[in-house]
Amino acid sequence: MSVVNNVAALDPVAPQLAWSDTPFASLRSVRTDAWARLPAGYVRSAIHLSSWPDDDKLTACTVPRCVRYFVKVHGRQEFCRPSCGNRARAARFCHRHRADSGR
Ligand SMILES: [Zn+2]
């Protein structure tokens, strides 16, 4: 266990808040050495996911090619962001339109 914590501590970070269409949290690294930042980032993510208190609400986004996970705010939520919902609706529309035109 201490190895995991030591690797996570290789890269001290500071939380940052950004705002586009929704609030988005990120971590700003203090170090510039990518060989220390990369394993520390992976281990931090693993620690965060394995200690998530409400793991039944943590789910993967259903949009193809989206690799994000998110916490469900309500039971029917399928997408990590509104932009993923828009991509899914556009893909369904194109699929229906192609099926109606007989192609
Ligand atoms: Zn997504």
Image (spheres, grey):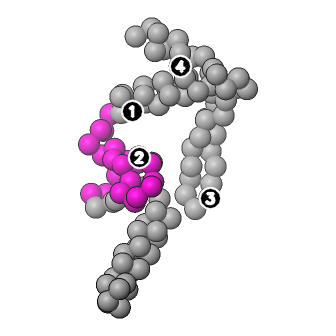
Q: Is residue 54 left or right of residue 61?
A: left
Residue 79 appears in the picture as rendered = no
Evaluate if marks 2 and 1 touch, with contact meaning CB atoms under 8 Å apart. yes
Could you tell me the amino acid type at mark 4?
A: Ala
Q: Identify the residue shown where x is 70% and y is 23%.
A: 33
Q: Report the magenta residues as a range.
A: 53-75
Residue 24 appears in the picture as rendered = yes
Name the mark on residue 49: 1
Name the mark on residue 20: 3
Magenta stretch, overall SS = loop
Q: CA distance from mark 2 to mark 1?
A: 10 Å
Q: CA distance from mark 4 to mark 1?
A: 14 Å
Evaluate if marks 3 and 4 touch, with contact meaning CB atoms under 8 Å apart. no
Q: Residues within 10 Å of mark 4 (few under 14, many from 20)?
A: many
Q: Residues within 10 Å of mark 2 (few under 14, many from 20)?
A: some
Q: CA distance from mark 2 to mark 4?
A: 21 Å
All told, the count of numbered labels is 4
Name the residue that disc number 4 marks.
8
Residue found at the far bottom of this picture: 101
Could you tell me the amino acid type at mark 1?
A: Leu
Q: Say whether residue 5 is magenta.
A: no
Label 3: element kind: loop
Name the mark on residue 69: 2
Q: Residues within 10 Å of mark 3 (few under 14, many from 20)?
A: few
Name the mark on residue 11: none
* Label 3 within 8 A of ligand 1 by Cβ: no
Could you tell me the amino acid type at mark 2?
A: Tyr
Label 1: element kind: helix
Sequence-wise, the earlier of marks 4 and 1 is: 4
Sequence-wise, the earlier of marks 3 and 2 is: 3
Could you tell me the amino acid type at mark 3?
A: Ser
